[in-house]
Image (tube, rainbow, N blue to C red):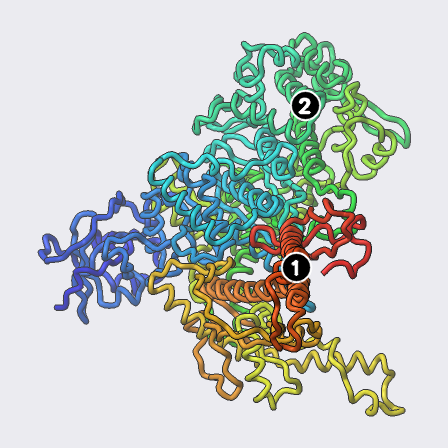
Amino acid sequence: MSSHSSTRVWVKSFAVDAIRNPKVNKFGSARSSSNSVSSSFSKVKRNYSHNSSFCDDDRSVSTSITLASVPTRGHQWGWMSGVLVDRTSKAVIVKLDDDDEVLELAATAMQDGVLVLGNDYENASQEPPSDLITLTHLHEPAVVNSLKQRYANDIIYTATGPVLIALNPFKPLRQLYSEQTMKKYWEKAEKNLNGDDLEPHVYQIADSSFRNMMRQMEDSLNEGTTLTANQAILVSGESGAGKTVTTKFVMKYLAALSKRASAPAVKAKRAYLQVEENKRLSQQMMTSPLPNKEDSKMIQFSSDSIESKVLQSNPILESFGNARTIRNDNSSRFGKFIEMQFTSSGKLVGATIETYLLEKVRLVTQSPGERNYHVFFELLQGMDKRELKKYYLSSSDRPDDFQMMSCSGTYDRRDRVSDTDTYRALKDAMKTMNFKPQEQVDIFSVTAALLHASNLVCLEKKGGHDDSSELDMTNPHLEPCCRLLGIPANGLNEALCTFSIKAGRETDVKRSLSQDKAEKELQAFIKATYGALFQYLVLRINDSIAYQPQDGDEDNIRNRPAATIGVLDIFGFESFATNSFEQLCINYCNEALQQQFNAFVLKNEQEEYEREGIEWSFIEFPENQDVLDLIDKRGSGILNILDDQCRAPGTSDRSFASDVYTKCTGHPRFQANRKQVAVLQFEVSHYAGPVEYSSDGFLEKNRDELHKESTELLANSDNPFVSFLSELLTDTNTASSNNTKKAEEPYRLRRIESSLSTTVGGQFRRQLKDLRSKIDDTTPHYVRCLKPNDHLVPDDYDEGIVAEQLRCGGILEAVRVSRAGFPQHYLHADFVQRYKCVAGGKDIKKKRSSSASSYSSQRPVWAPPVPQKTWTPARSFQQSASSPSPRKQDQQNKKSKITQVPYKEQCRDLLSIIYKKIKELEAEDSKGSDEVEECSEPPPTPITPVKAKPLAPWAQNVGKTPSPGSIKSRYQPWKQQHQPSQITAAPTRSSLSRDVDFTKAGLQLGKSKVFLRHKCFEMLERIRSRELARASTKLNSIFRMYLCRIAYLPVRDAYRAEFATGFAAFDDGKESKIDDESWNSPERRERGANASNLISQYENEFRMSFHDPNWMKKNKSKNKKIFKWVLEDGIWAKNPLVNDESIVEDDDQSY
């Protein structure tokens, strides 16, 4: 018997239940193969004594409940932890952690999947890894347990390859989102530091998207690139998982990066000054525990900046579009996609917001435990008496005084957020977005009017027919509602309680509505008006944050939007006790986004690996195209059937359900048993699990119609704002005609092409199609928000709930693909173009030129040829009479040269060099060296005593003017032999190894692309930054020496001339006697003083013109030459006075 006392294992829960109750079959559909599973079970041994050490796992699992009896949202997890006691050829013995129970399983338990091994960190009681792709044993219990241990330590972010997992802590973690934390992540990227010590964070995802955008915009400058610079951050998860908060942190970080990009560059300090400042800061931190006050002011947005406006759009949309639900206190009841527009320099210049499917039914009814939109509660709690009186409200009004706020009996928020505070935030946001005071009054007037409208009552009309009705004209809320909307009370009564039909071409016949139908029309009136108000707010926000071209932007491309980063915050998968039309649309959207996720992370990635011929084994993953076909396929999809029913006369919810049963029965994802058919219900098996829908109200919600009388009533309102809202309720033609008729109204906005459709479902499908096409044109980044428990309480981790969300999101499959995959792809030409600088440049060129017989040119391996600039000598004499035209022949020559470029061979050679440098960098990191090379000046060279030198050549020929040619020939620093660099020179083609295993370093060379693992990509970027820093330093030193030489020549010539004059008594180097009087004569002393003054003057002018760009403006009359580059605190910067006509009249007057 071999000992395995330190090996952690996980056992299937139903296997344990089967051993404990061998005579009872409780597996149901939970087991895939009864024979294989039952063969893995054996008898239970009690009180098994063995010297084994194990870690107690604080878990409460009810083993008396099997998976078959778990409800829709079960709390039992499918695994139990333990220690491997022994493993023989006949059995596997395991000791469970919960009750020290010892089980004896069959020897094939591991092969059957009943038993899986734990990871090394579990055996040593260590912290789990921050990236789950590094787990030795990757399976569901390992992922869930890793997340649990990190969550217990308030570490809510965990990387899983391309996906960031975010657990909702349900408590404030302010230090996690401080500005100091922001600084760590952008400094890691800006200074190319080794970020292994930084934990995964949503800031890291935002920073990665921003850096990718900037990098791809840089690469797009190269000819023939196929990269797209647009990025997308997709935040997904079920309700209550924290999507809205995560989205706000992403936007805040991107705005901070934009602020840094648009801020004036901080002047770099000299090396010795930086060292002194670092010492001072370190001493300050040791002596004072208080943080530096400057750190709290790193990110400050002015109220009129675009960054501030984009961030302040959130409070407005949250007040009017968020509400408390059963699972979340601040649930977004709409979806939004925010596209932030950046210039080529990374400055945020605008944004657009598109919203999806506002839940308007919440205005008239809420489920128990939920409440209406936040804005209604904010009005009552946040306004003072003066404001309340303006809207016919009083401080004594309570939420239960209004019908639309008291449907569920829920009035507060469990997260303890005050409605008074959110109202203040709403007012501040409106001020930042430049909402005028009267505009705010109009918005709140409509909101308050809907509060009053919800209390209106429809009565049966006295003395009329049974199907006639009228408003209660004595209702105290009728007059306030009408005054706030600017409509007459009689007109409102007629619009809600009657309707007109056409009898002939021009005759309208009015008919009365029954009390029940009049109440539904009142509800439709409230929903339509609020929907128009919300649409107006979105248009108004877009009008405020959209890119506004400034004077000169048409000529200056750097000030125009060049790329976008989209942030998607959309409703998560929903399954309630009663699910209706809204849940079907929401879950359909999640199905489509899940398919896009599968396609990007799983399907397309693996198919590309196979096409490129790299080493790869395909990983299976669930497909959901059949679910999408069940919902939206033309002719037989549920939503298409619903649209057909809405267009047909005399249809109802029952006829819709009957048509669904007829066309969808037999679909593998559709189910409707007799009990469900009796109550007009059906079930759809989504990727996240089965959901039962009730068809009650489907047609009404899909039509979302408002009678023409109500629309006309709003259009004729005395309030121009309400009149404008009516235009948003009309179709495209009516909207365009109203634009022409009312173009001078104060609330005219920049109109966009109407996206209204005849049905809500049809409009939503088109919006979702456009959203998917936008995402397909970007590089997506994924954040999966998880909810650790359903009670919304902190420090409570339910493994079953988390495991269910991981399975729904396809996280496990994504981790498997990511740990073996290559997320970074480059075409051969793009790879060579970007990383050619890593190859060592000129050293390679020298060696390549001597052994480039297989090439048609003498270009180095790392330099891609430029076909359009290549001269073709054969064209002048190879062309004959039958040859094509010169223009066509030239195009063919260029095309042939492009196809003959040996990019793949260049990539192979370049990869060999990169492979060695990555190994060197890994060895450097393994030594624990914290020194990181930055792009800064080298430390000053220590001063050493100067030895006596022989007389200079110019002193031997005093009085002779040196020839310019001799100076030029002596000063050519770019041709001097420098010290050999630390970079290893590239080997020649004959010596390059073709058998290097690039996979070990995370590299793969495909047929047309180079594939990089994420860690390899980060190391390669660090190497590239080092090489560019070295090259910049070398160019800077050459440039500085050249300018110093130019400025030195006049001083040297003046000194030589004075020296020659002073020693005129010397003739051809022969000494003659000079008496003391002639040497100390006043003329001689004057000449010497002049020479000294001349030298000092030239030195002073050189120094001032070299360091002060405004010096020439102060000395206009001197007509001196001006430098095109000036030295500002050790950094070369372009002189802004070069193009100043008042200073420089001729281009020849500047260096």
Q: Is residue 766 visible?
A: yes
Which quadrant holds the C terminus? Answer: bottom right
Q: Position of residue 531 (x, y in %)?
A: 67, 31
Q: Position of residue 930 (x, y in %)?
A: 38, 58
Q: Residue at x 55, y 79 (%)?
A: 844
Report the disc number at residue 806.
none
Residue at 56% across, 22% down: 378
Quarter of the N terminus within the rendering: bottom left
- The x, y position of residue 673, in whole percent, is 49, 46
Distance in Å between CA atoms under marks 2 and 1? 86 Å
Residue 440: mark in rendering = 2
Q: Which residue is mark 1?
A: 1084
Amino acid type at circle 2 is Gln
Quarter holding residue 414: top left
Mark 1 residue crowding within 10 angstroms, few (<14) / some (14–19) / many (20+): some
Residue placed most toward the observer, 382 or 414: 382
Left or right of 504: which side holds 643?
Answer: left
Identified at 44% across, 61% down, the residue is: 942
Q: Residue furthest top?
A: 474
Looking at marks 2 and 1 on the same chain, the residue that comes earlier in the sequence is marked by 2
* Callout 2: SS: helix
